[in-house]
Image: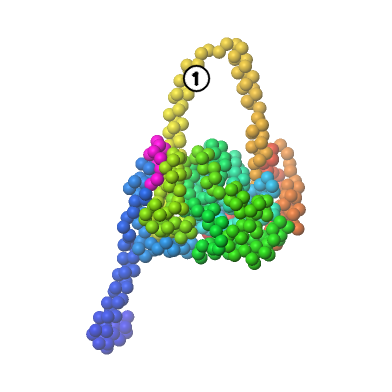
Amino acid sequence: MLEIVSYLSLLPFPVCVAVFGSVLLSIGVCLRGFSIMTAPEIPKLYFRESSLNTYIIDKCNMRSRSFSPSFWFSSRHLQTWLPIILPKPEVTFERQYLQMRDKGVVALDWVVLPHTKTKNKRATVILVIPTLTGGACHVTPVCHAAATRGMRTVVFNRRGHGGTLLTTPKLQSFGDPNDLRQVIKYIRLCWPRSPLAAVAYGTGCGLLMSYLGEFGSSALLTSGACVSPCWDTPERFLSSGPRGVYDLLLLLRLKTILYRHAPALDQVVDTGRALVSAWSLPEFDQAVYCPLYGYKDLNHFWEVNNPIRDVDDIEVPVLCVNSLDDPVAGCSGNDNTSDNTSIPYDLFKCYPNFLLAITRKGGHCGFLDGFPPKSWADELCLDHIEAVVEFTQKCQLQQLPHQKQQQQQQPPQHSGQQQIQTQQLSHQSQPNQRQQEHKAHAPHILHRYHSTSSSHLMSSNNNFNIGSIISSITGRSDSISSGQASLSHTHRSLSNTNNQCLVSSRYIAISKKRSSQRFTI
């Protein structure tokens, strides 16, 4: 340092002033960049008046909840890329494979945080749905935030995505909710008394909206939240040519997934043509998803996969967070909402279960503010879920006294009515057809990866040969890729051990004791 000062003392005075001034100015700008915020912005809300929306808005302080990103990352592109580049909180996941009814395999990544592990059996379960090409590594901030609140968090990985093995010649399309339905049923079987909510990001919002619309009141969800949903999806995927660099990156990522699972899909899809000739999203959908699902053309494809095709049937409270400068969702970037035709504002003004929060800044799935930067949208979604759960519980408590009064006011029953009621109770005690179908459609737990020593499993009524259970997977070795052979080898090694498994109807659990083999992000 003294050498630098002595060297500068030899320079002319104006040069020294210029050097010191430039250094001080640069340091000042950098320091102020961490503290100077853009003008605090209150999100614009679009909703229909209802007791639920009023309670949520007041509980979450949405009328005074400001979003203030620092000016040095207020750009729409920085807001989009920084969540991917910036360091994320360390989160440990436990992967669990589930077998679907058609023998396909999806993966669930359960968050494991020992210091925040809750023993409350009724703690809220959060199902996180990443973007179409995302995985657990992209949603670790919301997983960590939910776990610190005492919630159980799990990430849904589509078949063939997120490192999941492809055991059937089929990829999940944009709006096919069948796999998600079986996953939600399985989570409900594991935690029947816990509220279950879903948080989706980007193109994952289309899958969540499709599921909520198709299953309506039987969706088995308490609440839903969508961050940066793509409302212009049909127009985007039906238009010719890529719309900017983001569509091109999405197309390249989809081609990477297709190339990885080409051996399993060659019997149905011309993967070579799709990889070489398809250079737009419509061409890729025409070459891959239409043959997989038997669609006639792209119009038929989007009639079935449009995320808001059954929006009239959605009965679950849903929060949607969008920014006007979203470079992926096709928003205009103009504060004049009348020019932003991609967002269906009338939808939120007509249905009492929907709530829309609009910000000028935020990019696509960004919404970073503060220092260190954190997602403003993640906290808002978790607050929304807690408010819906609290509102639901209060409504249930208010209904209990009325139900007791109605039971007390009922006239005494005669002997004939008592006999009929006894017959009805005995009939209800037997498992009905719907319960049997529910158990029959429950997905199978294929395997939990474990790092600790093996142990015995519980056995209910029967002892099962694990090798026979997995034969449906390992028997398709001719149509799986080399990466999938490791899973088959793992299952064969398990079949040689003298383990027992829990058998309940078609619900088959293959696991070991304590923790499974975990991976940390």
Instruction: Determine whether, in the image, residue 426 is placed left or right of residue 360.
Output: right
Vertical side of 264 occupied by 179: above or below: above
144 or 386: nearer the eye?
386
Q: Quadrant of residue 237?
A: bottom right
Secondary structure of residue under mark 1:
helix
438 or 46: nearer the eye?
46
Q: Quadrant of residue 262?
A: bottom right
**Residue 82 in the image, given as x and y percentages of width and height:** 45, 63
335 or 30: nearer the eye?
335
**Residue 490 in the image, given as x and y percentages of width and height:** 70, 56
Any part of residue 15 in sight: yes
Q: Is residue 48 magenta?
A: yes
Crowding around mark 1 (Cα neighbors within 10 Å: few <14, some 14 to 19, many 20+) is few
Quadrant showing the N terminus: bottom left
Instruction: Determine whether, in the image, residue 465 is placed left or right of residue 76.
Output: right
Find the residue positioned furthest to the bottom: 10
Q: Which residues are magenta?
A: 45-56
Q: Amino acid at mark 1?
A: Gln
Q: Is residue 304 magenta?
A: no
**Residue 427 in the image, given as x and y percentages of width and height:** 65, 24
Residue to which mark 1 is pinned:
407
Q: Who's the residue at 50% across and 48% down the image?
A: 199
Q: Who's the residue at 34% across and 51% down the image?
A: 42
Q: How many marks?
A: 1
Q: Who's the residue at 49% across and 19% down the image?
A: 407
Any part of residue 173 in sight: no
Vertical side of 72 occupied by 113: above or below: above
**Residue 144 in the image, given as x and y percentages of width and height:** 47, 53
Q: Who's the residue at 51% across and 40% down the image?
A: 312
Find the residue positioned furthest to the left: 13
Vertical side of 220 occupied by 410: above or below: above
